Structures are given as structure tokens and as C-alpha cells.
Amino acid sequence: MHSTHPALQADTWEEVSRLRDETPVFRSDFVNPVDEKSTLWYLLDYDSVYNALRTPDVFSNVGSAHPFSEGDPYSMLPGELDPPDHTKMRRALDPYFAPSPIKKLEDAVRETAITLIEGFQSRGECDLVTDFALQFPTSVFMELMGLPKDNRDQLMSWVNAFSAMMGSEQAITAAVQAEQEVLAFLAESLVDRKKNPKDDFMTAVSALTVDGEVISHKEQVAVAYLFFQAGLDTVASQLGWTFKYLAENDELRQSIVEDPDLISGTVEEALRCFSVLSHTMTAAKDTEVQGCPIKKNDRVVTLIAAANRDPEEFPDAGEFDATRKPNRHIAFGIGPHRCIGSHLARLELNVALEEWHKRIPNYQIKAGADLDPSMGWAVTRISSLPLHWEP
């Protein structure tokens, strides 16, 4: 299975469902350019993915974000730690992303969404991805971190480099270069916060304490890097697929315009049906999944998109049901590494749909548009979604 395969490009979600039904666990023939002897496995069914994400003693997160990097790259902390080290650092960070502090951000998040939408509303057209989906979470991230707004275009260019990683060896090289630039940018910002503390998350990271001691500068950069990677392309990609579906389904779109209370269910079902995130781990020991012998140090990709469409877990899994209950999707992962930013992501997604449909209730995808879908190493995205409406 390769991200550039034509079948995955043509219909990503149906193809991953077909692969799951055909072979829920399989070994890939993908060759890692850094380690040609490494073996790569894919887990696609709900039970296998769910259990793998909940057993860090079997499937380790250490080194999970750098499958193509040589040497000693920055880890993304605490994401690339296993318990108990992960537990300690996660416990120090959780209070900043709990429901209560995230709720306090709602007014600022809503204002950001409104400003962006009203900037192109009267034009009668926009590219949902470049004009809104990328800019919205990036602006929220910069506000949260306390970064200058004039850095937004640079941040988005780095995000694009990471998103294209699986396209070619050249794309991998560009992504590695972008990573170094991001790390240098974050390191400089953290040094500034030590000298000039502010009321923002970057300042909190610069003074983060674990086991009674302030973490090292390198660890601070690694924490900031995790939030950079996790908070931008994921939300942008989720918005792209969600708006694509709404643009193609007039009845659902009209229902949320008439009854905004349906938006939260629509967001949850979009997270299930279009789960953009995959999670890569390394086998910590020899194990077996559905009869497949996975050896220690093998790479394992949990394909959450396929798991969340598993009919063994979700009745009528291929149908989009905004009123689905229960909806035990694992779009944000499960277990110790469940996404720390899930409350913020949900807020951004709900606000985006609410404020957009107040202002632009009816819209269509431009005829002949090339959406350029792609399944990256971690995130499945569309690169463009040209929309038009009556201004």
C-alpha cells in the first residue's frame, strides 16, 4: 500500500475500506530509504487498531515521527515517549488543553473564523483549503502560542512541506529541511520567552516543570514542535474533507443551516468518516496480530481511517449519519497517546461550520476542479477545494 497509488488518490475512503475488508492486517513492500531492511505493517480493522494504540508496552511511540530521518532527530514530546515518562510530561501539559481553558478561547477562535470568512464572502468564491482551512487553525495556533501574525505564511509553507512528504524522495528531503527550519524558529521563540515572558503557551512551555525541575531547552523545543505538527495540518485537512462532503450533499447542508444543533453531530460523523490521521509505532517486542508475525523493531501503521469505517464496529459504516449514536470513533486516537488537542480541534471544527453556514449557506464545488487528494505518512488531505456561491 503506497500513498501515491492511483486507487487511493481516486477514492481514498472507499479504497481503505476495501483494503480492510480484503486484508485487515498486511505487510507492505514499501522500502524505507533510510533503513531498507525495515519491515512495515498496516493494521486496518477497528479491533487491531484500537488494541495497538492502547498497548505501549507492545507498540512503542519512541521514534515514531521520524521514519525517514538519520542520526538523532528531535523527538516530538511527549508524543514520542512511552509511559511512565510520557505520563509525567503529559500530566504537566494536560491542564492547558482541558475543556475549561479551551472554552475560554472560544471568542477569539470565533472572531478569527468570522474575519477570514467575511474577507472573501462578497467575492462569491474561494479556495476553501488555501483561503480558509489552512489559515484558520494556523491563526488560532499563533494566537495560542503568542507568535507574531506576520509569520503565518511561513508556517503554512512548512505545513505544506510536511504534508507532501510521501510524494517522492525529493519531497522527503524538503520535509526534513522544513523540519530544521521549524525547530530553529521555535528554539529562537522559546529563548525570547525566557527573556520576555508573556501570557501565552510558548511562555508556559519555556517554564514547563516535570518531576519538580524545568525541562531542558531541547525538550521545550520538542514540546513546541509537537503542537506545531499536530495542530495545523490535521484540522486543515479535516475541514477540507468535511466541506467537500457538505458541498456535495445539499440535504445535509440545508439541515445544519436550518438547525445548527446538528453541527456537533455532523462534526463527529465527519471525524469518523474522514479520519485524516494515521499513527505510526514501532514493535517493542515480537508479537502477533491476526496471525501476522510482527517482529521487534518492525514499523506499524494504524490506519485509523479504515478502522473508523469498520462495519464490525459501526452499523452502516459507509453511510454518513449526523445523528449516529453511539459514535465510538477513534479519530483522535485512544489510550495514553490520545490527542491532547482534541478539545481545541473540536472547537475549531464546530465554530468553522457554525460561522460559515451563517454567512454562506449554499455553495458548490467548481466544475472540473482538481482537488489533488493525497495520503501522507500521517495525514490524508486535499490540496484544493474551489467553491462558489451567490455573493
Image (cartoon, grey):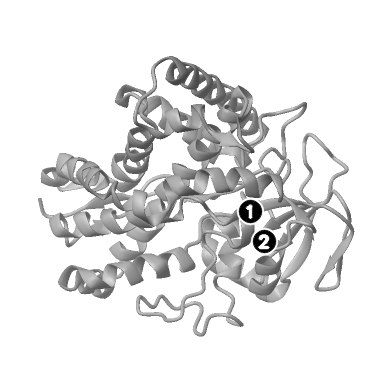
**How many residues crowd mark 2 within 10 Å: few (<14), some (14–19), many (20+)?**
many
* Residue 362: assigned label: none
Q: Residue at x 51, y 85 (%)?
A: 315
Circles 2 and 1: CB atoms closer than 8 Å: yes
In the rendered view, tell whether residue 151 sits above or below residue 313.
above
Position of 171 with respect to 190 (left or right) is right
Q: Amino acid at mark 1?
A: His
In the rendered view, tell whether residue 169 sits above or below residue 133.
above
Q: Position of residue 367 (x, y in %)?
A: 29, 55
**How many residues crowd mark 1 within 10 Å: few (<14), some (14–19), many (20+)?**
some
Q: Position of residue 48 (x, y in %)?
A: 71, 70
Question: Which residue matches tag 1?
Answer: 279
Foreground residue among 42 and 190? 190
Q: Position of residue 10 (x, y in %)?
A: 52, 59
Position of 251 with respect to 370 (left or right) is left
Seen from this angle, which residue lies furthest front?
A: 212
Q: Position of residue 368 (x, y in %)?
A: 34, 53
Question: Which residue matches tag 2?
Answer: 53
Q: Residue at x 51, y 74 (%)?
A: 328
Question: Mark 1 or mark 2, which is nearer the start of the sequence?
Answer: 2
Label 2: element kind: helix
Foreground disc of the pair 2, 1: 2
Q: Is residue 382 visible?
A: no
Q: CA distance from mark 2 to mark 1?
A: 9 Å
Q: Quadrant of residue 52?
A: bottom right
Q: Residue at x 32, y 67 (%)?
A: 264
Foreground residue among 17 and 74? 74
Q: Amino acid at mark 2?
A: Leu
In the rendered view, tell whether residue 381 sits above or below residue 189.
below
- Report the quarter where the N terminus lies: bottom right
Q: Quadrant of residue 44?
A: bottom right
Label 1: element kind: strand
